[in-house]
Amino acid sequence: MTSPIDRLRPATSVHRTARDLVTTFGLDVDARGTGTGQGADALETTEIWSVASDNRVVTEGDLFVALPGAGTHGARFARDAISRGARAVLTDPQGARLVAETGAPRVPVLVTEDPRGVLGHVAAWVYGEPATQLTTFAVTGTNGKTTTTYLLDHLLRALGWKGGLIGTVEMRSGDRVLPSRLTTPEAADLQALLATMREDGVSTLAMEVSSHALSLHRVDGIVFDVAGFTNLSQDHLDFHGDLQEYFDAKAALFTPQHARRGVVVVDDAWGRRLAEVATIPVATLAVTTGTRGDLDAPAATEGADWTVSDVRALDAAEGTGSGFVLRHRDGRELRTSTALPGGFNVANAALALTMVLEAGADLRDVQVALEAAGGVSTQVPGRMEVVGSSPRVVVDFAHNTDALSLALAALRPTTTGRLVVVFGATGDRDKGKRPSMGAVAVEGADVVVVTDDDPHGEDPAAIRAEVLAGARAAQQAAAARVEPGAVDGVRHGGPARAATLVEIAPRATAIRDTILEADAQDTVLVAGRGHEVWQEIAGVDHALDDRVEARAALAARHETTKEHGE
Ligand SMILES: CC(=O)N[C@H]1[C@@H](OP(=O)(O)OP(=O)(O)OC[C@H]2O[C@@H](n3ccc(=O)[nH]c3=O)[C@H](O)[C@@H]2O)O[C@H](CO)[C@@H](O)[C@@H]1O[C@H](C)C(=O)N[C@@H](C)C(=O)N[C@H](CCC(=O)O)C(=O)O
Ligand SMILES: Nc1ncnc2c1ncn2[C@@H]1O[C@H](COP(=O)(O)OP(=O)(O)OP(=O)(O)O)[C@@H](O)[C@H]1O
């Protein structure tokens, strides 16, 4: 996690007056600030050239948009924002009262009932609608957003375009890179970043759009050229209430307010439903290779615009990953590969390709670019990232049930020894997924090490207990499915193996002990935190990078092996 101070801003700007702002967006002017009827019209003389919605990032010339939030009201920070150079405040009626109460220096205070609802449009307007000068790709879905945007960015660069990237791991404008705090930045930061990209000569944008961002209006004011949907499964129900509400948030991206056209993976029922309810033209994509447990292949592929077929594991000389063919129902086809392991990465690669083709790229140009680039392959930080061998250690961001299950399934075919998983569940977030994560872990792995993820404000031991309870319940259910009289535990209908279940905390110890004790032929999957470098425990961030811990353990292990002359 980075501080809210980190953001990119354009060096040049258009100057707008507070008067233009009031007129363009039909805002009220609070009489307690400065405005009309006070000698010189303060609205005419107040110039604004940038926007911020957090006082900690305010600089000279900003419009400070003070938002009501779950924790506090931004108006409480108006005084500080003005002292940092904010020229005017935009807020709701409660915020206007708070600004007056805090005795902030008098600046124009502009008022609207729903400042979050207008922030995206206001910021886009202030920065001169930068998104309209880029070819923009947005990816949403429960899993695969980061991977797909990296693959999109890789493809766009291979085609010779200068790409910008926004997502969970980082924000990139030309050569400038900044770590991300949110998957999708708040609207003021986002529009400033897009204006920076325009300045840096960036021509395309590959961006993750989270369901939170759609619900909280972070991407309002942008109409993406192509929106892509990966899949939907349980996550974030602490925020969205239920799966239908979560789906509705994502479906909003597939409306004319947010995108011109869409590409929807129809492997799951939610994708098929989205293709039906979308109010923009949508191309459907079916990945017929059983990437998902609930794939109903004939139903999914029938009538799909694009299909994936001929999926094959690359051989040792070619590297890891899969080769595949992407075919349109008009007969056009493209033969390529991705070095990223797992069927789900075929889906991610095919989605990235289809989005670029639906944006108008010529299929032959794409084929040529892919041949030169070695397929749809790029290393995505903390996504199926192989950090060492003997034992093979893979760090992956799988932090929900579906992703954990698929990550284990992806590693099984190339594991000659045992498949070991080290993972935990996050605190203060969607608690319902804890037992099911425990269950899929014992179903997919031979050794399951339950540890801590980000406990946030919760007791880590209590979180582990919920995961362990789910794991044990799944094991008991599987054992109960052993037919009476079955010899030597030969099971019918349950998993083929009985996983060993252990609890180790803290996380660094779990990673170290597991790697030290594994056999050289084993694969150790360290799941849940991927690229993250901070672990939050009770409001305090502690440095923790799974990849660093894993490499240290591998080094210690290899050192010991050398000492013993093995
Ligand atoms: C549910 C959610 O997304 N909440 C976001 C929202 O919080 P909020 O409206 O409750 O804000 P608040 O903390 O009450 O503050 C109110 C206002 O005062 C401002 N403020 C607050 C404190 C201060 O010192 N100064 C200041 O100006 C804040 O910037 C805000 O505008 O606005 C805040 C300011 O931008 C965000 O930090 C906060 O994200 C929280 C931290 C968060 O964790 N969000 C996650 C869940 C999120 O958005 N995740 C998705 C990805 C999910 C996924 O797919 O994995 C994402 O796009 O990142
Ligand atoms: N298409 C997919 N279907 C299911 N699981 C996937 C898919 N792609 C990736 N995953 C799994 O989900 C994890 C997260 O992947 P990725 O970071 O690309 O998704 P994301 O949508 O950006 O996630 P988040 O929003 O949590 O950052 C990966 O580490 C992998 O285990």
Image: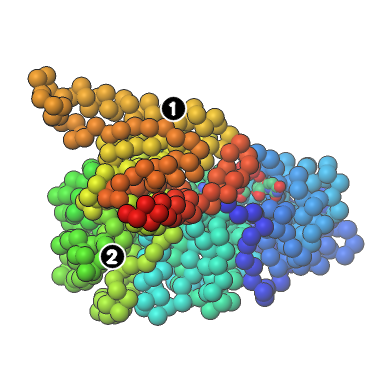
Left or right placement of residue 185 versus residue 366 in this view: right
Badge 1 element: helix
The circle drawn on residue 465 is 1
The circle drawn on residue 11 is none
x and y percent of residue 299 in the render? Answer: 17, 48
Amino acid type indicated by mark 1: Ala
Q: Quadrant of residue 204?
A: bottom left
Badge 2 element: strand
User: What's the residue at 19%, 60% (across, down)?
Assistant: 313
Crowdedness near tag 2: few (<14), some (14–19) or many (≥20) residues, C-alpha within 10 Å: many
The circle drawn on residue 338 is 2
Front-most of 525 and 156?
Answer: 525
x and y percent of residue 39 in the render? Answer: 90, 62
Left or right placement of residue 182 versus residue 289 in this view: right
User: What's the residue at 41%, 51% (across, down)?
Assistant: 560
x and y percent of residue 169 in the render? Answer: 49, 58
Where is the C terminus found, in terms of image quarters? bottom left
